[in-house]
Amino acid sequence: MSVGAPSSPPAGKLDEELFQVQNHALIRAVLGNISEGVSIADLTGRFLYTSPFARWVFNVSDDVERPEEWVERYGIFLPDGKTPLPVEQMPLWRALKGEEVRDVDMFLRNPNVPDGLYIRTNCLPLRDEQGRQLGALVLVRSIDQERRSEAERKSAEAKFQQLVETAHEGVWTADAEGRTTYVNRFLANLLGYSIEEMLGRPIFDFMDEEAQREAARQLELRRQGHPAMLELRQRHKDGSAIWVQVNASPLQDEQGRYIGSLAMLSDISRRRAAEEEVRRLNQELERRIAERTAQLEFSNRELEAFAYTVAHDLRAPLRSITSFSDAILEDCPGQLDAVGQDYLKRIIGGARRMADLIDGILTLSRVNSTSLILREVDLSAIARSVLEQLQAQQPERRITLQLQKGLVAQGDPQLMRAVLENLLGNAWKFTRKRPEARIEFSATNDARGVRVYQVRDNGAGFDMTYGEKLFGVFQRLHTQQEFEGTGVGLATAQRIIRRHGGRIWGEGQPGQGACFSFTLHELPLPFQG
């Protein structure tokens, strides 16, 4: 390809005219426009002057190159760094054609800049006083750092954009007036809109009235520079409600002035639905518990009334049986043989045992109906009092008593006395066949730090195989001939301990004694109605 350069004075004439006195203004203009590099070429494209920077960056030699060779010789590419710059688009070529070329960006790669360099070029035609073109002026400035910084910024922006667009959270920005300036795809999809439909619209357009009032209050806080985290009900395009958790922060310019707000939104609709379902179930459960409690209270009152009525109605005939049997034994001893007298004694014993059973039933029924009055109770003192009463009834017995001092707990004094009367009474009863009986009341802490109270004896004991019967009503592990009793005492003790939020259990071995343990306030208290 040949260069069609315009007709012009000989190259030597440009040399002569360029440095004449009348061209000093031209030279000053050239120097005034020099940024980092300057070259002056005649109309043939031969460089008459090249500054050091321009010479280095273009790798200019003293060899005369034809314009067709410039691209390859100087390593000139389009800004993409890959495509060679067409000759007809070169700024110098265009300036030699008489065109003023401003701010053309190019990429150079040659032996002097093997890694490449971005430059910005301005080329101006040079003319004499008659307007005839003498050549062209080339001004070169490196923009490499700017371009690379711009490329890094765009790369970072692209990565950030990709991160935002692929996030499973909504991103929403608004200007100072609350108009939407940006939403990511996740948020747009969440609300059922396209991004374009949301841009420019007030954020209130996507909320119900209640949420709008809260959002307006929150925007005022953003204007004051306060961030916040809250839950709002957004409105889907189809009108349905969507609950979101919002983390909002104010946006400020370099002078610290409020210019808008940024919000990160998470869809919490499922969580809110689950919470609402839990609330509904709790309300239903509370309703059922209230109904069941009312039914139990009614049943307990009915059972208590029934027990009282039965006990009252049974006492009269039992008293009659006992009284008339005693009268026969006293008034007619000569009319009855030994067998008859034995029968009457058995009748009297059975009637008295029946009376004891009735008393036990009444005591058991009153356990749950008695109001629980919690106060500080000295269990050691109660135990001592119970054992002193037992000793007074049988002063002949030799028993070693070990009572730990200072055992104080929160409980109902009357009910806790009933517990110790049953447990210590059993220990007293089941050790009566021991010539050297031993009864102990103490307390210790278990591995969890829970206080455990214990009544231990060296009496008859029991077989653990039948341990589940211990606390059943009318359940006994010994015959009436071995040890008297009604089978109600331990059941009563268990109900009292449960009312105090505790547990009670027994351990023993036949002939080696027993140990009954209980705790207080370890478990949630049952209903105290």
Image (spheres, helix red, strand yellow):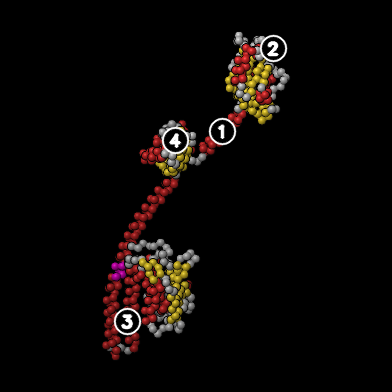
Circle 1: is it few (<14), some (14-19), or many (20+) Cα within 10 Å? few
Q: Nearer the viewer, residue 462 or 172?
A: 172
Q: Secondary structure at mark 3?
A: helix
Q: In the rendered structure, does residue 424 fall within the stretch colored magenta?
A: no
Q: Could you tell me which residue is drawn at 60 percent across and 17 percent down?
A: 29
Comes first in the chain, label 1 or label 2: 2
> Which residue is denoted by mark 1 in the rendering?
153
Report the amino acid beneath label 2.
Answer: Gly
How far is the residue under mark 3 from the one under mark 4? 99 Å
Bounds of the magenta segment: 304-308
Task: Judge depth for marks 3 and 4 and give the one in front.
Answer: 4
Considering the image in quadrants, where does the N terminus appear? top right
Q: Could you tell me which residue is drawn at 43 percent across and 31 percent down?
A: 200
> Which residue is denoted by mark 4 in the rendering?
258
Task: Judge depth for marks 1 and 3 and give the one in front.
Answer: 1
Give the side of residue 36 with respect to residue 325, left or right: right
Comes first in the chain, label 1 or label 4: 1
x, y percent for residue 184: 49, 36
Q: Main secondary structure of the magenta part?
A: helix
> Which residue is denoted by mark 3 in the rendering?
348
> Which residue is denoted by mark 2 in the rendering?
12
How far is the residue under mark 4 from the one under mark 2? 65 Å
Q: Give the image quarter of residue 309.
A: bottom left
How far is the residue under mark 1 from the one under mark 3? 108 Å
Report the amino acid beneath label 1.
Answer: Arg
Report the amino acid beneath label 3.
Answer: Ile
